Image: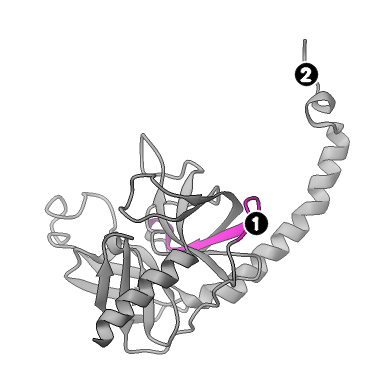
Amino acid sequence: MQITPKAAHGLTPALFALIWVMAAPAMADHAETAWRMASPSVLSVQPTWPGYERPGFGAPEGTSPEGSGVAILEPGLIVTAAHVVARATEITVRDHKGARFPARILAIDGEADLALLRIDAPTKPITIAPGRPATGAHVCAIANAFGLDLSITCGIVSANARSGIGFNPVEDFLQTDAAVNPGASGGALVDEQGRLVGLLSAIFTKDSDANAGVNFAISTELLRARVGKMLETLDQ
């Protein structure tokens, strides 16, 4: 038996198209708001890896070891993914206006794949959402994908509280279908108001590192807890 669009969805193709056309402007408005509010707090992270000057001796040939970071808590403090900077000999960050600043590592949490950086320049700490977004909520990823500078992609929260995936010893992930590609690690997953709901961390794929629609961001609950511990250690 052939399944018609009406039988499959309960909607005629014309009605489905009408709903999509009506929803699209609202989705675009949310993305524009998220970008306007969050992008000034997201930075491109440019580490120099050992041997990167000679491709094949440290950095993968033909690739750029760039990543992303998010300004948090106080001016000059940036959180990123530990795997972006852990092997770096030098780190430069670039803000949304193109200004570049040297950065130094303050602390690394290898268990949760987090690192804190400091730059001697003012930054705009991102607003952190008060709670965890619901599964199905609209979210956007703002990051430095493929080292091309900041861009935005949007989707939904595909699943919540993912752990035991195997990326890190300590995991509490939001899963999203917002497109995430190499270079986005350490970038921001934000809600429709541009508030941080997760830190982009990993792509689940078997054949390549390109986006497959199953992407993971460290929850802000875990982010707060682990960053808090790193800052406590620095104060001791």
Start and end of the magenta stretch?
A: 133-146
Residue found 65% across the figure and 50% down from its top: 136
Q: Is residue 224 above or below residue 67?
A: below
Kind of residue indicated by mark 2: Ile
Residue found 58% across the figure and 71% down from its top: 129
Q: State the residue in front, 30 or 226.
A: 226
Q: Give left or right: position of 3 versus 37.
A: right
Q: Does residue 44 appear in the picture of this structure?
A: no
Circle 1 crowding by C-alpha within 10 Å: few under 14, some 14–19, many from 20:
many
**Which quadrant is home to the C terminus?**
bottom left
* Disc 2 element: loop
Q: State the residue in front, 198 or 192.
A: 198
Residue under pointer 1: 138
Location of residue 42 in the rendering, given as x and y in whole percent from the top left corner: 46, 72
| Residue 134 among magenta residues | yes
Q: Is residue 50 above or below residue 42?
A: above
Residue found 44% across the figure and 79% down from its top: 72
Q: State the residue in front, 57 or 142.
A: 142
Q: Is residue 96 above or below residue 162?
A: below
Q: Does residue 142 appear in the picture of this structure?
A: yes
Question: Quarter of the image holding residue 171?
Answer: bottom left
Which comes before the other along the chain, label 2 or label 1?
2
Circle 2 crowding by C-alpha within 10 Å: few under 14, some 14–19, many from 20:
few
Location of residue 101 in the rendering, given as x and y in whole percent from the top left corner: 32, 82
